[in-house]
């Protein structure tokens, strides 16, 4: 099967397998405030991540490109929505276009449609500094994502079997490119030790890409007759992964993603320690099944919902929301306790 056909398979099966809501966000409840003492008009959802200034904490996460006309059309529409809604947007892995120049247009369209927006390039951890620079240059990117997808590769019969040296290569890329590097997972989450290892080589932003939404083990298992079903439940649920990352010994900027589909998911992700949040499968489904206008309306409604939730909590900014008190129960409480993370840091704090 060609790389281009595989891209379309991923889209097809991502739509079919969908979002399972196994993110652990349901184990979190905000502590209600009867006297929030702010107005909806006081709330700002602007955010700064390093040198990237964002009008929204939501961004469209890496999905596609490199699969000819169909992926060109999806990227074009995603870029238009990102432009209209003021969201940052990442493209899918650009390796296909680095290997085959005829696929470049499927990525370049994102910059063409969104000349002044925040765009994020994307490659796997096999990337060398030269490939990373070429991917950034291809879409004049403002940042680069490097994805870690060991479980997806292992689940794929034709996938990689060699994973040594990834951290060293990431270190070289971070040193040599002149945009921020975001290291991301693709739906299996990151534990705090992974985040600490990344931080030790100079990475300053991670996207936890947690478990509970799009499931690439399930997608690859559907594509193969040699199913590795034991990976279907593998991974760290998104809410838990954000908390793990925010308890790393060396703090770094966290993007919360994996299975997000509502304003309350966004608010909980930020309150757990994320500075921004990524959406992939949920947006893809709306775009493909309902069209571009519906996706734009959904993003407006996510923004409105987030402002309303922030008002209820008395949080005027994303920074405030990061210290809103919340209660953690169930599986998430058990996990964090076993991992030595004190959930009282969340339940006994207040917004200053
Ligand atoms: C992805 N994702 C992804 N990630 C990445 O870093 N490079 C890529 O090329 C792709 N390709 C891709 C294709 C499709 C069809 C989907 C749905 C997703 C993973 C994506 O960015 C995200 O990390 C996961 O999908 C988990 O988030 P959601 O989908 O649960 O919001």
Image (cartoon, grey):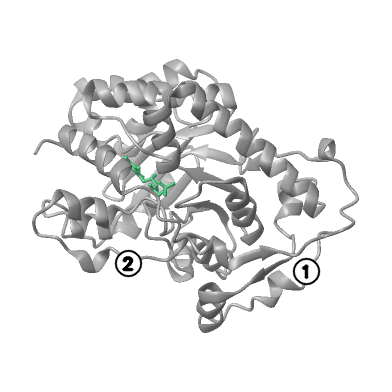
Image quarter (top left, top right, bottom left or bottom right) of the N terminus: top left
Residue at disc 1, CB closer than 8 Å to ligand 1:
no
Position of residue 286 measured from the top left corner of the image (x, y, whole percent): 43, 33
On residue 234, which mark appears? Answer: 2
- SS at circle 2: loop
Q: Residues within 10 Å of mark 2 (few under 14, many from 20)?
A: some
Position of residue 44 measured from the top left corner of the image (x, y, whole percent): 76, 38
The quarter holding residue 120 reads: top left
The quarter holding residue 65 reads: top left
The answer, for residue 274, to whether it is visible in the render is no
Q: Give the vertical position of 23 relative to 143 (above or below).
A: below
Is residue 127 rendered to the left or right of residue 263? left
Question: Which residue sits at x=21%, y=52%?
Answer: 220
Is residue 245 rendered to the left or right of residue 22? right
On residue 28, which mark appears? Answer: none
Position of residue 135 measured from the top left corner of the image (x, y, whole percent): 34, 32
Determine the quadrant in which ligand 1 lies: top left
Q: Nearer the viewer, residue 205 or 47?
A: 47
The answer, for residue 268, to whether it is visible in the render is yes
Question: Which residue sits at x=43%, y=47%?
Answer: 175
Question: Which residue sits at x=53%, y=53%?
Answer: 256
* Residue holding disc 1: 349
């Amino acid at each position: 099967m060609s790389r281009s056909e595989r891209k379309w398979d991923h889209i097809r099966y991502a739509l079919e397998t969908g979002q399972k809501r196994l993110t652990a966000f349901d184990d979190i409840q905000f502590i209600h405030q009867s006297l929030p003492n702010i107005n909806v008009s006081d709330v700002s959802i602007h955010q700064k991540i390093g040198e990237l200034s964002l009008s929204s904490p939501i961004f469209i996460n890496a999905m596609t490109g490199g699969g000819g006309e169909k992926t060109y059309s999806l990227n074009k529409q995603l870029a238009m929505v990102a432009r209209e809604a003021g969201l940052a947007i990442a493209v899918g892995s650009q390796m296909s276009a680095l290997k085959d120049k005829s696929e470049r247009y499927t990525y370049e369209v994102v910059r063409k449609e969104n000349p002044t927006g925040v765009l994020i390039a994307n490659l796997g951890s096999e990337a060398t500094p030269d490939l990373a620079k070429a991917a950034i240059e291809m879409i004049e990117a403002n940042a680069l994502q490097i994805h870690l997808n060991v479980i997806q590769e292992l689940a794929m019969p034709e996938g990689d079997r060699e994973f040594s040296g990834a951290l060293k290569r990431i270190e070289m890329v971070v040193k040599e490119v002149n945009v921020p590097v975001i290291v991301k997972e693709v739906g299996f989450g990151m534990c705090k030790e992974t985040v600490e290892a990344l931080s030790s080589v100079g990475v300053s932003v991670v996207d936890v890409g947690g478990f509970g939404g799009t499931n690439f083990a399930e997608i690859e298992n559907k594509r193969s007759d040699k199913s590795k079903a034991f990976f279907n439940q593998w991974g760290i649920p998104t809410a838990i992964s954000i908390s793990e990352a925010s308890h790393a010994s060396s703090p770094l900027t966290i993007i919360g993603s994996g299975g997000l589909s509502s304003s309350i998911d966004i608010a909980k992700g930020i309150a757990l320690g994320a500075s921004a949040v990524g959406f992939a499968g949920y947006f893809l489904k709306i775009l493909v099944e309902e069209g571009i206008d519906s996706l734009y309306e959904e993003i407006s409604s996510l923004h409105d919902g987030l402002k309303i939730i922030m008002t209820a909590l008395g949080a005027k900014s994303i920074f405030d929301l990061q210290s809103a008190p919340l209660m953690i129960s169930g599986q998430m409480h058990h996990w964090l306790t076993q991992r030595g993370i004190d959930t009282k840091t969340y339940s006994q704090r207040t917004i200053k």
